[in-house]
Image (cartoon, rainbow, N blue to C red):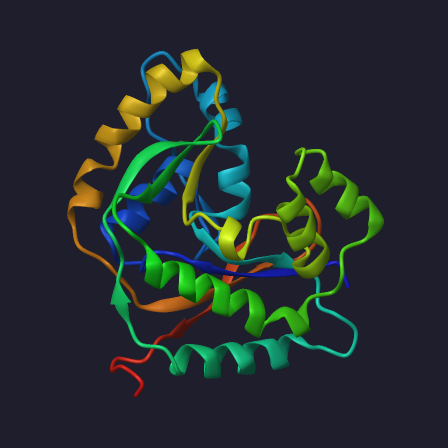
């Protein structure tokens, strides 16, 4: 099986943040429809598409459980059922205010305040769905190691197939490829304005999204949204 799955946070499809983010990356991962990207002074349309290539491929999202192939003996139906139960056991909670900034050279939306609830949710996802994850191949491991991992990141890579989970996790919504200093200086202020209205609206984590990539090179799309409980679980 070539399909990969991931558990992501994505803003609700009717929110301004979702519409603004999808417009920016040039695709709606819910409908899989291409979208016209905004005009940015000083950047050609081709340049803008190149700078948003990966965010467009993965969709406007924040990672909770990184992409994985299903392990032997597991099924998509089983994954859906487990995710439905998992979501129902957790309550809706406020999304911390987000702001545009740089993360390792990438423009991204990041929490402006503490994000403990998001960090707990991501850690729970990593552990709860690990049985569904096929171990990475040697080539996949070597590709990750090209990022010069720390010893802790190497240990997480071997245990969970991804180096940036648990204590190495940083909640973020990626907006661009890695930017050079000149592009960052011009583009980040523009993104601050582009997302200004959307980020002024309060938001909640209402559901968990199961994304799928049918085969290598194709875009990730939302298979299903699994609503969190409307009331806290005691």
Q: Where is residue 34 in the image (x, y as percent from the top left)?
A: 46, 42
Q: Residue furthest front?
A: 151
Compared with 58, 176 (above or below) is above
Quadrant hosting residue 53: top right
Is residue 223 shown to the viewer in this render? no
Relative vertical location of residue 231 with respect to residue 93 in this rendering, above or below = below
**84 lies left or right of 152:** left
- Residue 175: x percent and y percent? 42, 36
Position of the C terminus, as image quadrant, is bottom left
Viewer-proximal residue among 52 and 65: 65
Residue ID at (34%, 63%): 117
| Residue 164 in the image, given as x and y percentages of width and height | 56, 49
The residue at 66%/34% (across/down) is: 147
Say above or below: 13 vs 82. above
Tally of numbered tags: 0
Left or right: 135 in relation to 167: right
* Quarter the N terminus occupies: bottom right
State whether residue 162 is above or below residue 195: below
Q: Which residue is drawn at 25% across and 32% down?
A: 194
Q: In this orientation, does residue 212 appear?
A: yes
> In x, y percent, where is residue 4?
66, 59
Left or right: 213 in relation to 169: right
Of residues 53 and 143, the one nearer the viewer is: 143
Identify the residue at horizontal 25%, vertical 37% (top origin): 195
| Most distant residue in the right direction | 138
The front one of 112 and 7 is 112
- Name the residue furthest bottom: 234
């Amino acid at each position: 099986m070539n399909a990969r799955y991931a558990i992501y946070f994505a803003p609700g499809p009717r929110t301004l943040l979702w519409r603004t983010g999808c417009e920016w990356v040039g695709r709606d991962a819910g409908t899989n429809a291409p979208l016209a990207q905004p005009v940015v002074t000083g950047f050609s349309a081709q340049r803008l598409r190149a700078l948003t290539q990966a965010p467009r491929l993965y969709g406007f999202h924040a990672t909770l459980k990184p992409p994985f192939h299903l392990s032997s003996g597991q099924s998509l139906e089983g994954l859906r059922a487990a995710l439905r139960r998992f979501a129902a056991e957790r309550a809706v909670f406020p999304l911390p205010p987000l702001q545009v900034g740089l993360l390792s050279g990438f423009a991204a939306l990041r929490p402006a305040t503490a994000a403990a609830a998001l960090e707990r949710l991501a850690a729970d996802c990593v552990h709860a769905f690990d049985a569904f994850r096929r171990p990475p191949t040697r080539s996949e491991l070597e590709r990750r190691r090209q990022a010069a991992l720390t010893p802790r990141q190497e240990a997480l890579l071997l245990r969970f197939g991804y180096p940036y989970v648990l204590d190495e996790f940083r909640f973020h919504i990626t907006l661009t490829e890695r930017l050079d200093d000149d592009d960052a200086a011009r583009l980040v202020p523009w993104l601050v304005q582009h997302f200004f209205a959307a980020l002024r609206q309060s938001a909640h984590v209402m559901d968990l999204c199961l994304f799928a990539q049918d085969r290598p090179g194709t875009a990730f799309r939302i298979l299903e949204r699994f609503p969190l409980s409307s009331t806290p679980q005691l």
